[in-house]
Image (cartoon, rainbow, N blue to C red):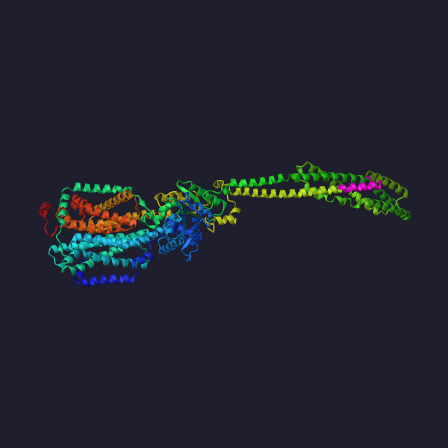
Amino acid sequence: MRRLAGFVARWPWVVIGVWVAMAVALPLSFPSLATMAERNPLVILPEGAPSSVTARNMAEAFQEAGSDNLLVVAFINEDGLRPDDEATYRKVVDALRDDDDGDDVVAVQDFVSTPQLRQFLTSEDKTTWVLPVSLTGELGTPRAYEAFNRAADIVTRTVGDAAALGDNHAASGNPLAVYVTGPAATVADLTVAGEQDRLPIEIAIAVLVLGVLLLVYRNPRTMMLPLVTIGSSLMIAQGMVAGYSYLTGAGVSNQSIVFLSAIMAGAGTDYAVFMISRYHDYLRRGADFDEAVTSAMMSIGKVITASAAMVGITFLVMNFAQMGVFRTVGVSAAIGIGVAYLAGMTLLPAIMVLAGPRGWISPRRELTSRFWRRSGIRIVRRPVPHLVGSILVLVLLAGLAVGAEFNYDDRKVVAASAPSSIGYAALEEHFPISQSIPQYLLVQSERDLRTPQALADLEQMASRIAQLPDIALVSGVTRPLGEVPPEFRATFQAGIVGARLAEGTAMIGERSGDLQELTAGANTLADSLADVRRQVNAIAPSLQTLLDAFTSVRTDYGGDKLVRDVETAAKLVQAVNELGNSMGVNFATVKDMFGWIGPVLAALDNNAVCDANPSCRDTRMQFQRLVEARDDGRLDRINTLAGQLEGFEDRQTLDATVTKLNRALNDIVKATNAMGLDSPGGAQAGLRDLRQGADRLASGSRQVAGGVDELVEQIKVMAGGLSQASTFLLTMRHDAAAASMAGFNIPAEVLSAKEFQMAAQAFISPDGHSVRYLVQTKLNPFSSAAMDQVNTINDIARGAQPNTTLADASISMGGFPAALRDTRDYYERDIRFIIIVTLIVVLLVLMLLLRSLVAPWYLVGTVVLSFFAAIGIGVLVFQVIFDQQLHWSVAPLAFVVLVAVGADYNMLFVSRLRDESAHSGRFGVIRTLGSTGGVITAAGLIFAASMAGLLFSSIGLVVQGGFVIGVGILLDTFVVRTITVPAIATLIGRANWWPARLGPRAEPQEPVAAAAEGQERE
């Protein structure tokens, strides 16, 4: 430190030149910090966050452009939506789908292309439609911001500027108002607000800090030194942060830029105040200007170094946090603290070396030292009441922090006058915000989930989730509209089978007339066949006798006589044949007349319908008898006889032959007489009867054939229905028998149907290994209750996995509630990490600086208590008075700043106390308060003023952070450092420095009483 002080005092212009060169070179070497904030924006969650992984997996599985950049267009007509409003809605949908660039809009969820979505996109009071639009780019990135601006511009151009701003056009006959809102709009408003707030905040910080410096130094030239140092160091720090982002790709946010300005203004001014204050002390002791600068650097330099190391390391360690907001703020703030430290230890002393001899920074009379010494005397005399009183105040305020409720809803961060806030407010009057903020349950498995059993297991899981409290809707492949379709129930499918069988029964009943015709035809056929049988039975014996006679002739006769007899017999045979021909009866073909009976009888055998009909059964019996006559040879004998008559060759005696022939002819005559063939008229009548019988036989057979055809067709229909019923029932027995099916069944043939595949493509990935369900909550999707519900849904879904086809599947949640759940989880882990690391760093730095194991503990403990007290005041002001929850990011940042800066002030106080307590700890407390009270108070006021500049932001979390940190600094300045710590130090005494021992000071010190008397005389 001595060498550095000597170099600065000897070469001030070189030091100033180096800083000027850096201030010029860095902005020229790298893009501006604002440009880097657009190029490398803040990413809040790490890539491995469950909701982020789910979003990527879902986008990959469903072959979609994954995006959380969601825009919501709200169409509101307070008088009720009308057809012309729907025309406007369709125009906006068409315009977004026909985007000229083609790469801004990823998807539009509208009821024009998907009519089934109408009920989900329409409010219950029929006054509001919502149009969710997914845009390109990750939320918060420049690409996403550009996509939002162009999509919002498309909506504005389509509906008109006034309508897009939500103006009511009732006077012009068009009361439809169109609002552009949603997460994309909120982030866009935050981006705009951050850019617009930067300049006002920096001006406010400069004015407030300048006012405090003017109050402290009462010298315009003296107060300008810290401002010059801070201004130049801030310019260089912003260039270095931009360079770091440019080289590493680290994210930068507008909030981190604003916080960088505030933290550098506070810390840089504190370092300047410490340095100038010690410089004034040495000038008052009679040192020359250069000696005062070097002495101040050597004496206060170790305190500033320790302070900067403590704060800088604490911020730097935040880079190991998992959330982007802590990493970006931590790195930028650490760079800022480092630059502020170097400026305070080099640039400021160099300026002081040049300005001191000119009288620009000469000390003024100390106005507050008497007050602080009297305060020290009171504390030393009654340390316990002061300690108890201060602790009681801090504890009471800290008790309010117990009721802190943290907000994860970025909508509340944006000003109420922002367009997205106006849109949300209008939308929530008519529409549950949860319906426009989707969340998904994603199930992924190594097996194909497009099976009846897997779908049944999925439905069981969805059913369990749907039964949870505050679940509005669970929609997916097994329940497209939130309920299982009746077609997917086994009872419904069984009903369809029953209905089809009933239709077959009814059809048979309707054709009962045709069955009656079949019966009549069968009866006619039976009667005709009976007549034929009687006639055949009458002819057959005569023909047999005739055959026997001719056989005898062939056996008995031979030789010449046989020839003559044969000639005579031939004439007789010829006469018989001619007789048969004249009758129209070819006896050789009698058997062929009944060749059709066999197939008909085979068709009627074992026929259920014929068995049930008596007439059909009788007819079938007659057919059977004819077949039996053919089988036992009676008809064959007729054919044989006819053949023998025509081929007769043997001879018998004429008398015997004639006798036999006479008998045979007598029999034939008798048979022909019986048949009515003894006269021409009788023959004609017989033939006529035979023809009519044949006609009746043909007609009956036709009726039977037609009836049988109809019966066959009906049986085919019944067979088809029974086959379908059998297939369904067997499939159900195989696929739906498990208890997990619970009456749910999607047949395999349905899964392969084109209609089902088209309807299911929104819920089942093309490869069938991923399935998603849309889950709508009744809760505010940005609330802590909705985050807890995400965990409950996950637990219930995983509880449905064992012993199912989903046992090896991965289940996760995606969407905004899940992302906020991850934000809360990472925040809780990060804040624990930040608290532990901050406490360890601060304790170690204090122990090394003070070489004590006692004092650092109560110094850190009191600062932590002041932090909780500051949070308690924040709860009182924002949560109780203004009905605003504290943003989740306020507490971690406030803890780091308050603990580090508060410990910084305590370190300054205790390091001076160590020097002043060589002979008397109580006297050292009085002298330390008198010498540091004004300095630390001024530093605290300056730091609080720099934080107060953040109150001019339009972003809620910036305002809350500035207020809590500012109040905490004031508490530490006026309560902890001025009352609590001196009281504790007085009570502990020399044990403060254990295990080190204090050596005697070179110059004697007055006792406490003498010091008190000297203060009273002043």
Give the percent coordinates (x, y) of residue 631. Answer: 75, 42
Residue 602 shows in this picture: no
Q: Is residue 1013 left or right of residue 38?
A: left
Q: Is residue 847 left or right of residue 446?
A: left
Res 606 quadrant in image: top right
Q: For the point 20% across and 42% down, which residue is it?
A: 390
Give the percent coordinates (x, y) of residue 362. Answer: 13, 56
Q: Please determine whether, in this image, residue 161 is positioned above or below residue 780.
A: below
Q: Is residue 541 left or right of residue 497?
A: right
Q: Nearer the viewer, residue 40 or 516?
A: 516
Res 551 quadrant in image: top right
Count of number-bearing discs: 0
Q: Is residue 150 magenta?
A: no
Magenta segment, which residues?
675-693
Give the percent coordinates (x, y) of residue 952. Answer: 26, 51
Give the percent coordinates (x, y) of residue 618. Answer: 71, 37
Residue 956 shows in this picture: yes
Q: Is residue 691 magenta?
A: yes
Q: Nearer the viewer, residue 476 or 997?
A: 476
Q: Residue furthest top?
A: 614
Q: Quadrant of the N terminus?
A: bottom left
Magenta: main secondary structure:
helix
